Image (tube, helix red, strand yellow):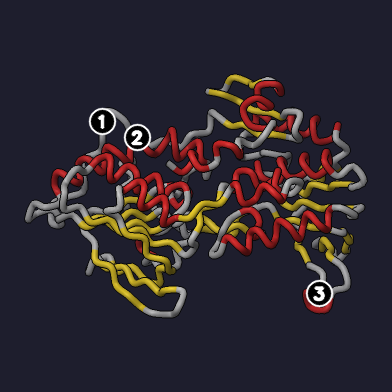
């Protein structure tokens, strides 16, 4: 009777759930998904939600409904936070929202806990209602804002800067990339095109400057401000920090993490040094932290690994055998050749297998509606 535990209830966790039930046909399969939020959030649309907060409820979906549908009512959703994973005992400790402690024993464990965003509107860190609250509050502030600072020059920062500048014409937007250029280190080949489009919208781009943020009422501050290394400050009506603060992995032993807290996995996505433990999604060290990478770089490998594990898991020597041999047909390589970055409703920049996309293609593929009408399908 294979027991599978899945940590995480967003893109990777729900994709893992679907893959597990499509892969293992055992009538005795037991699957429990653990997540701190009751709802999955289609956060890819968060830049658009800043100007369309009324669409927020079209982007959140009950995790328990997904579990019921995907598993045909055979899976279990456990609402709570993982506080510890004992890899030797093969045991997950979960603290419920009410504070009750429970333990989940597993044969196979999928770690799909993801990453945390600095600003709650960009991700559901624990409670989807917090994300909704932040989206609505910032939208209200943007109605009369004269100055906005975006800190972080990755995909989310670039999309947010373009969206706000286009939708709130009275607002002067400044993008602090913290890098040599927008999208540098993400899809550097798009940096120049992205910069030109942002500047055409009136966005001021400040590169190669690292800043701190002090928000209004923080330590008695009267206004939100950017703080430079020199001690100089610059006030803004709205400041959004558009970057990740790190992975959700504090419950894991240091032995399976890199120096940034991401889980170290091999080319099969098996956690190194562990048997029957797999990592999936943004939590994987070296992954490109994108849904494109999850769907087209990881899921196929994950499926193959799970198929092998399900064939072996009920054998007496499953835990004592060496790690699964590396797949010679395919192995995980982070996807960096495909990216679509809207910069306002009118289009943006992108590449598909390294080939440049026109702004019109970006409009058709994402910028027009951010695919909000297809939000639920992104988790299936």
Please report whichever mark, 3 or 2, sits nearer to the chain's N-terminal start. Answer: 3
Badge 3: how crowded within 10 Å, few (<14), some, or many (20+)?
A: few
Q: Is residue 125 visible?
A: yes
Residue 35 falls left or right of residue 106: right
Mark 1 is surrounded, within 10 Å at the Cα level, by few (under 14), some (14 to 19) or many (20 or more) other residues, namely few
Q: Residue at x 31, y 68 (%)?
A: 92
* Mark before the other along the chain sequence, 2 or 1: 2
Name, please, the residue furthest toward the left. Answer: 316
| Quadrant into which the C terminus falls | top left
Quadrant containing the N terminus is bottom left
Secondary structure under tag 3 reads loop
Q: Nearer the viewer, residue 108 or 186?
A: 108
Left or right of 276? Residue 337 is: right
Rendered location of residue 107, percent (x, y): 21, 58
Q: Residue at 38%, 62% (x, y): give it.
A: 34
Residue contact between numbered discs 3 and 2, judged by CB atoms under 8 Å: no
Question: Which image quarter: residue 94?
Answer: bottom left
* Residue indicated by mark 2: 300
Mark identifier at residue 238: none
Indicate left or right for 81 with 276 as reference: right
Read off the residue under disc 3.
Answer: 217
Mark 1 and mark 3: Cα distance apart in space = 56 Å
Does residue 231 sit above or below 166 in this rendering? below
Q: Secondary structure under badge 2?
A: helix
Q: Secondary structure at mark 1?
A: loop
Disc ID at residue 328: 1
CA gap, disc 2 and disc 1: 14 Å
* Residue 216 picture location, percent across and down: 82, 69
């Amino acid at each position: 009777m294979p027991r599978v535990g899945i940590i995480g209830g967003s893109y990777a966790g729900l994709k893992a759930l679907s893959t597990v039930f499509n892969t293992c046909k055992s009538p005795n399969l037991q699957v429990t998904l653990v997540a701190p939020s009751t709802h999955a959030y289609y956060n890819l649309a968060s830049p658009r939600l800043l100007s369309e907060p009324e669409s927020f409820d079209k982007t959140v979906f009950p995790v328990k409904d997904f579990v019921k549908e995907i598993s045909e009512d055979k899976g279990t959703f456990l609402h709570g936070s993982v506080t510890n994973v004992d890899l030797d005992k093969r045991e997950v400790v979960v603290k419920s929202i009410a504070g009750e402690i429970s333990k989940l024993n597993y044969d196979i464990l999928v770690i799909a806990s993801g990453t945390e965003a600095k600003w709650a509107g960009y991700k559901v860190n624990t409670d989807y209602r917090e994300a909704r609250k932040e989206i609505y509050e910032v939208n209200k502030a943007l109605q009369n804002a004269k100055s906005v600072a975006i800190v972080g020059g990755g995909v989310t920062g670039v999309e947010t800067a373009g969206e706000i500048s286009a939708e709130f014409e009275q607002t002067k937007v400044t993008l602090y990339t913290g890098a040599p250029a927008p999208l540098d280190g993400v899809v550097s080949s798009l940096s120049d095109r992205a910069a030109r489009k942002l500047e055409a919208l009136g966005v001021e781009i400040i590169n190669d400057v690292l800043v701190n943020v002090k928000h209004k009422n923080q330590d008695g501050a009267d206004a939100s401000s950017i703080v430079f290394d020199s001690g100089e400050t610059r006030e803004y009506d709205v400041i959004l920090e558009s970057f990740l603060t790190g992975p959700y992995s504090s419950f894991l032993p240091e032995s399976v993490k890199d120096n940034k807290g991401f889980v170290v996995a091999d080319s099969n996505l098996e956690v190194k040094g562990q048997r029957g433990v797999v990592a999936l999604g943004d939590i994987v060290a070296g992954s490109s932290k994108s849904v494109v990478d999850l769907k087209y770089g990881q899921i196929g490998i994950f499926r193959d690994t799970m198929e092998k594990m399900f064939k072996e898991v009920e054998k007496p020597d499953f835990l004592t055998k060496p790690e699964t041999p590396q797949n010679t047909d395919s192995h995980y390589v982070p996807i960096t050749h495909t990216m679509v970055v809207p910069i306002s409703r009118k289009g943006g920049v992108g590449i598909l297998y390294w080939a440049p996309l026109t702004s019109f293609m970006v409009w058709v593929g994402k910028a027009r509606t951010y695919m909000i009408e297809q939000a639920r399908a992104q988790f299936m």
